[in-house]
Image: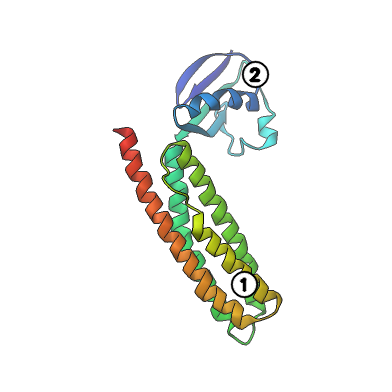
Amino acid sequence: MLTLRVDSSLIPGVIAPITVDALLSAAEPILSRTGRIVTGLRINGVDQPAFREPDVLALDLLATDDVDLVTTPVGDLATQALDDAIRFLPELGDQARALARGLRGADVAPHCAGIGGLADNLALMAALVHTADLWARQAGLAGHDWLGEDIVAVEQAAGAIERATVNEDWVRASDALERDMAAALDAWGGRLAAGRAQVLALGQLVTV
């Protein structure tokens, strides 16, 4: 039979051949009841960092294979993602302010390209916070929405910037970047900081 360990604990009775996908599909519902998620996979001692990708999921595991699953509490994942978001948000605010200053200069072309980069970074930030929110809710550690009104304000500022850019109204674009976007990002950072404090407080209650 396949040798399977979860966090170094041997799990007996796993019949092979079985695909990685089928193994994860069987293990993860059980792990989710304990508030954990698979975050690492090793096959015969070799780490599989892309184990969620289709080509790895399709691999057949044989009876001679040695497989390790590494798990992490979803509450820890939520906190890590939230910490990343709180750390990166001020950088986005600085990026918005720098673009505003650039658009007030003589040569706006390089800074116009930067607006697209800011939009991409904002989309990544929203995805990161959404994922953190899902993990926290799964662990019972989220008390309120971490996107909420602040992401609405970010989206409204982004819309104003886009309209001004299309019209080549650089004064309005710079104002929206410096005033509306930067302020929305600052407010969002405050919401996330409050959310992190709440996660830590709820985590202490859960572990008592």
How far apart marks 2 and 1 lie (CA) works out to: 55 Å
- Which badge, 2 or 1, comes first in the chain's sequence? 2
Residue 165, position as x, y percentages in the image: 67, 75
Nearer to the camera, 61 or 126? 126
Q: Nearer the viewer, residue 202 or 34?
A: 202
**Label 1: few (<14), some or many (≥20) within 10 Å?**
many
Q: Residue 161: which disc?
A: 1
Q: Secondary structure at mark 2?
A: loop
Q: Is residue 114 visible?
A: no
Q: Amino acid at mark 2?
A: Leu
Q: Looking at the image, what colour scheme do you see?
A: rainbow
69 lies above or below 111: above
Q: Residue under label 2, please give it.
A: 62
Task: Name the spot of residue 17 as percent of width and height, x first.
Answer: 66, 17
Res. 98 visible in picture: yes
Vertical placement of residue 203 versus 187, above or below: above
Q: Residue at x 65, y 81 (%)?
A: 169
Residue at figure coordinates x 46%, y 37% from the top left? 74
In this image, 188 relative to 44: left or right? left
**Decide: marks 2, 1 in contact (CB < 8 A)?**
no
Q: Position of residue 206 (x, y in %)?
A: 34, 34
Mark 1: which secondary structure? helix
